[in-house]
Amino acid sequence: MKLTDSPEAVATDLQDERLQARAGLRGGLTTVIDRARGGDLGMIPVVVGLVVIWTVLQILNPVFLSSANLVNLAMESAAVGVIALGIVCVLLVGEIDLSVGSVSGLSAAVVAVLFVGQGLPAWIAIAVAVVMGMAIGYLYSQIYNRFGVPSFVISLAGLLAFLGLQLYVLGSRGSINLPFDSGLVTFAQFAFVPPWLSYVFAVVAAGALFASGFFHARDRRNAGLSASSLTALLARSGALLVVLGFVLWYLNQTRGLGWMFVFFVALVLIMHYLLSRTKWGRAVYAVGGNVEAARRAGINVKAVYSSAFVLCCTLAAIGGILAAARLAAVNPSSGGGDINLNAIAAAVIGGTSLFGGRGTAFGALLGIIVIQSISSGLTLLNLDSSIRFVVTGGVLLLAVIVDSVSRRSRTSHGRA
């Protein structure tokens, strides 16, 4: 900025300087605060809630935050977390799937019958079950797109039908045990990441976060928009590296990081990339936000619905297989109980809106950790499972209330 510059040029330079300042660490914090005031709370409520839950449970039982218990908590979260990730997909387009529990149980039964009963290789049995999940999702989408049947009714019918089909597949055998020496059971129960490799994962994650932010900031600058500074990007990546390094060091005090949990996190990262960096992801949010506006914008709405249903049922099948491997058995109750409700609750507690158009893949990760933390903590306190249902229901209701209030706040803020 020079003394000979025009007032307009001086004003423009000052504005650019303010934008650059906002791109730093303080600017990032200001942006978060501004979004929260506008009703876009993101994952702030679930993070705060998780901190509160962990603090209370640790005070009540010092074993809760022990390395051994956290390792178990992570492993127990993976299977239902994968199912919750599929629920996020359908919720984002403003729909619901009530049959994910039955689909997961049927998939587990198919794997057990083909692998144990028929002697087929495990990978073939898994492939058949996953393809079956994809076919179920495609069937749902065709019924929804062609006949306009509400997804609530479609999935409710699927819940009953696939539960009956699961019982038929298992037949008179009832329960089928999976071999403990099989790769499937080993992966779910005994396979843990070597400590040195876990730290490599932390470095790669921090590096990927920096690279992603750097290229995104470069594209915004090329478009003449404000962007995060290099200092902010380095600080953010460094903070992630420190946090992940400490968490992994703590988990490595016992068994360490399980490969099944790594697999779950990998699916979350893939889904996050698809939702945030691809044309398909933008279409999903557009359809969930306003389906008519999305249709007028040229988006193939029916294809988006189809992809959401297919992904949901596919991930439900994968989650059912992981749950069976974790238990090393399949029985008529597989996929039943509270699996269905916990998967839906995890997605909602993680910040995915029931009204569509808002949520992230990371919501499934945080949501299932909240639910599993409640379950683990109350188990350590030797409390009855009835209390766990009551507490989980209360947390779910609170999450929906926060979502409704923030949605109302965004609407009023937009009108203002």
Image (cartoon, rainbow, N blue to C red):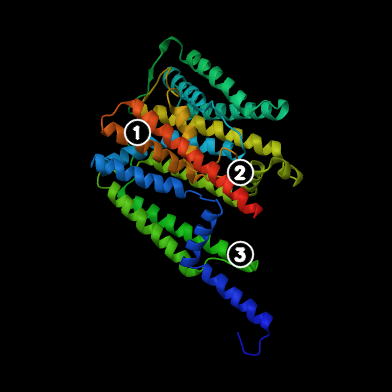
Q: Is residue 104 above or below residue 366?
A: above
Q: Which residue position is annotated with label 3?
A: 220
Residue 159 is drawn in which quadrant? top right
> Quarter of the image containing the C terminus?
bottom right
x and y, in percent, of residue 138 in the image: 63, 29
Residue shown at the point (47%, 40%) measured from the top left: 399
Numbered badge on residue 375: 1
Q: Earlier in the sequence, mark 2 or mark 3?
A: 3
At mark 2, the secondary structure is loop
Residue shown at the point (53%, 16%) measured from the top left: 165
Q: Is residue 154 above or below residue 311?
A: above
Q: 20 or 39: nearer the eye? A: 39
**102 sits left or right of 57 in the view:** right
Q: Which residue position is annotated with label 2?
A: 357
Distance between the alpha carbons at the discs numbered 2 and 3: 24 Å
Q: Earlier in the sequence, mark 2 or mark 1?
A: 2
Residue shown at the point (53%, 36%) measured from the top left: 86
Q: Earlier in the sequence, mark 1 or mark 3?
A: 3
x and y, in percent, of residue 136 in the image: 59, 26
Amino acid type at circle 2 is Gly
Circle 2/circle 3 CB separation < 8 Å: no
At mark 1, the secondary structure is helix
